[in-house]
Image: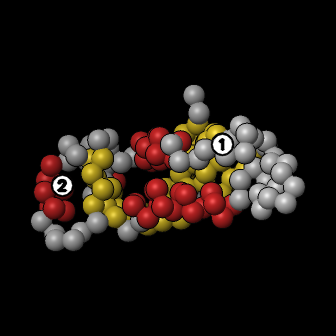
Amino acid sequence: MFVTRRLEFDAGHRIPDHLSQCRHLHGHRYAIEITLQGNIIAVPGDPANGMVMDFSEIKSLAQRHLVDLWDHSFLVYEGDTPVVEFLRSMPGHKTVVLDCIPTAENLAEKAFAILDEVYHDSYGNYLRLERVRLFETPNCWVDAVRK
């Protein structure tokens, strides 16, 4: 069985080598869909009985380990030195320095790696992260999937 939870967050970025508008500082209303696979839990009397994982727990874990860190931040590549220095010059600015250019593809892979460490099989139902879908706009998204 597959279950998916969607969350949204706002963040800024820039693609330094891009030839169009994306090379400028700008932001997006990102949406992230987290898809887990597992068997349906069959533990009578347990609050998770009949579920793969409670949707509220999927949200809570993603919120704590990813969304709260990236929401209303500027996602910047560590090699984009002028922008890194500029952001560091602003006291208290919420900046996330990444070891990759913050394209949708790279952000989805980062999110997958982070969340893959978070979702654990607690019931013997073979729970695992299968896909992270990251929407950069309502019409443009990427999928990072288990290899």
Residue extending furthest toward the top: 147
The residue tagged 1 is 121
Q: Residue at x 51, y 62 (%)?
A: 63
State which quarter of the image contains the C terminus.
top right
Q: Residue at x 50, y 43 (%)?
A: 117
Q: Secondary structure at mark 1?
A: loop
Q: Is residue 124 left or right of residue 86?
A: right
Neighbours of disc 1 within 10 Å: few (<14), some (14-19), many (20+): few
The residue tagged 2 is 84
- Out of 107 and 3, give the one closest to the viewer: 3
**Which label belongs to residue 29?**
none
Residue 4 visible to the viewer? yes
Q: Is residue 13 left or right of residue 8?
A: left
Q: Residue at x 71, y 59 (%)?
A: 54
Neighbours of disc 2 within 10 Å: few (<14), some (14-19), many (20+): some
Q: Looking at the picture, how far across and down is residue 68, in whole percent?
A: 44, 64
Indicate the colouring scheme: secondary structure
Q: Amino acid at mark 1?
A: Asp
Check the image and report above or below for 75 versus 8.
above
